[in-house]
Amino acid sequence: MTSLIDHNPHSNSIGFSFSQSTNAGTKEHSFYPYTDNGGSVLGITGKDFAVLAGDTRSTSGYNINSRYVPKVFKIGGDEDGEGAHILLSVVGFAADGLALKEKLDAVVKMYKYQHGKPMSVRACAQRLSTILYGKRFFPYYVQAILAGLDEEGKGALYGYDPVGSYEREQCRAAGAASSLIMPLLDNQVNLKNQYIPGSGEGHALEARKPEPMPRETVEQLVRDAFTSAVERHIEVGDGLQMLVITANGIEEIYHPLKKD
Amino acid sequence: MNHFPGTWGRPRDDVYGPYDSSYLRSTGPKAHTQSPAVTGTSVIAVKFNGGVAIAADNLASYGSLARFTDVKRLRVFGDAAVVGFSGDVSDMQYIDRLLESMDIRENYSAHGNQLNAKNLHTYLSKVLYKRRSEFNPLWNHILVAGFDGEKKPFLSSADLLGTTFSAPHLATGFGAHLAIPILRRLFPEERPIEEITKEDAIKALKECLKVLWYRDARSLDKYSLAVITQEGIEVQEDQQIEAQSWAFAETIKGYGAQTV
């Protein structure tokens, strides 16, 4: 009984059910707000066009959620994408990707209403970077690629990291199979490690200069990249959605991929 | 007895240790749901020619305890959609209240438009995504079945992270592992939806529920089944899994691989 008597009235050891806040320990947070929905996207530019493509599989772990969930979107158009002049692909956490797409779509539409002209791809690219950086400390867990035609009508492509670092490029692969596709693109689009035969010995060997590729070649390269990625990556497959933007508008092409 | 009335009638601290009152805390860090408490298991659904069928069992588990055996996890929204809930049951009841108030508001509004299943799914996925972004998730994975704006059968899913996807057949939880392979075999993608009758769909769902009852330890043999067609929504609650055959169980030794 002694231990009950020697209680100090100000001590926390009395079994009151309140005023315990001062020594409350930190709470463990076991909720993780991100997931990876797999898939890959790829963009290549040409002289007067840009291609943005992605597979349509959605995964969680080893499960296939669905065989058709597009991750390449038209930006700035109406509900059916009519009148859009910019393409965006997002890969990584699909819910963040969709939220990002809707935000950018709203921004591009508001720009048109307020300025009476469509937003340039350059301006849209900078704005997308700002949107991503705006969530620097709770990022959109996505790798984004933006595509369109620049002021001169040339194909424009911008690649992003999840917090908004971006650069204009000739080609970019992102997502689950990016490590499989990007080296192929380095070699086939930017002609890395390709030399003109017989142009010299050793360091004198002249490197091939990359040039814009015709549309047919680009489309075939995209298909090859994805059929190869499907062979080696389990999160890639089911279908290939390819959006091609030219001065005449946006064309959508769908190719089936292996469903295994 | 001592002169601290606050300690009277309480378990003695020197015997039982101080009372853990952390759950009564009103100050300090706010505790959000970090794990679900009372949960429902799989929801399964399949599209057929002219509608969607959806089913879930009537069990709410508390961990491994089969706590409530008469919980209806299919909720009808207006005359347009059925929402199937898996995951936390209290969060389900909260969402149900949200939907109820929205339904009343919509019915009293003057615009005369009816929210369809697609609208409902968009709304629910945004609620779920907003809550996950606040680190205060609604711990559910839901399926929404009904019709879209063009009166075509609609079936889509949304989870606690706000991830959404749509497919001809969907299942949450354990059903994603056990029911989806059965449904994909019965209704392969090559088979046009026009060939799948309402009876086929219902039969398939009942078969899947039976498999889940055999192998999902958190399932029940009492279930609800809803069929949504243009004629309306038929909900059957308090159904019983029929033609059970536990003969296979007699041959199982150990974990199943054992033969002697």
Image (cartoon, rainbow, N blue to C red):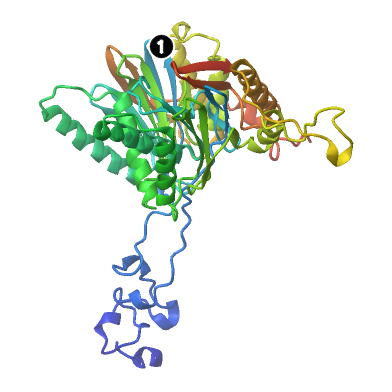
Q: Quadrant of the C terminus of chain B?
A: top right
On the image, numbered disc 1 is attached to which residue?
A: B198
Residue found 36% across the figure and 52% down from its top: B134
The number of numbered badges drawn on the structure is: 1
Q: Quadrant of the N terminus of chain B?
A: bottom left
Residue found 70% across the figure and 35% down from its top: A183
Q: Nearer the viewer, residue B253 or B40?
A: B40
Give the residue type that dot 1 points to.
Answer: Lys
Bin the neighbour count of mark 1 within 10 Å (Cα to Cα): few under 14, some 14-19, many 20 and up.
many
Residue farthest to the right, as pictured: A201
Q: Is residue A199 above or below residue B190?
A: below
Q: Element type at marker 1?
A: helix
Q: Is residue B166 above or below residue B14?
A: above
Q: Is residue B72 visible?
A: no
Q: Is residue B245 left or right of residue B132?
A: right
Q: Is residue B200 visible?
A: yes
Q: Is residue B132 above or below residue A100?
A: below
Q: Is residue A71 above or below residue B31?
A: above
Q: Is residue A161 left or right of residue A222?
A: left
Q: Nearer the viewer, residue A215 or B64?
A: A215
Q: Quadrant of residue A82?
A: top left
Can you give x and y, in whole percent of width and height, for residue B254 in the image?
Answer: 70, 40
Q: Is residue B227 left or right of residue A252?
A: left
Q: Quadrant of residue A203?
A: top right
Q: Nearer the viewer, residue A72 or B50?
A: A72
Can you give x and y, in whole percent of width and height, for residue A72 in the image?
Answer: 48, 28
Report in which chain the residue with disc 1 lies. Answer: B
Can you give x and y, in whole percent of width and height, for residue B24 in the image?
Answer: 31, 67
Residue found 18% across the figure and 22% down from its top: B113
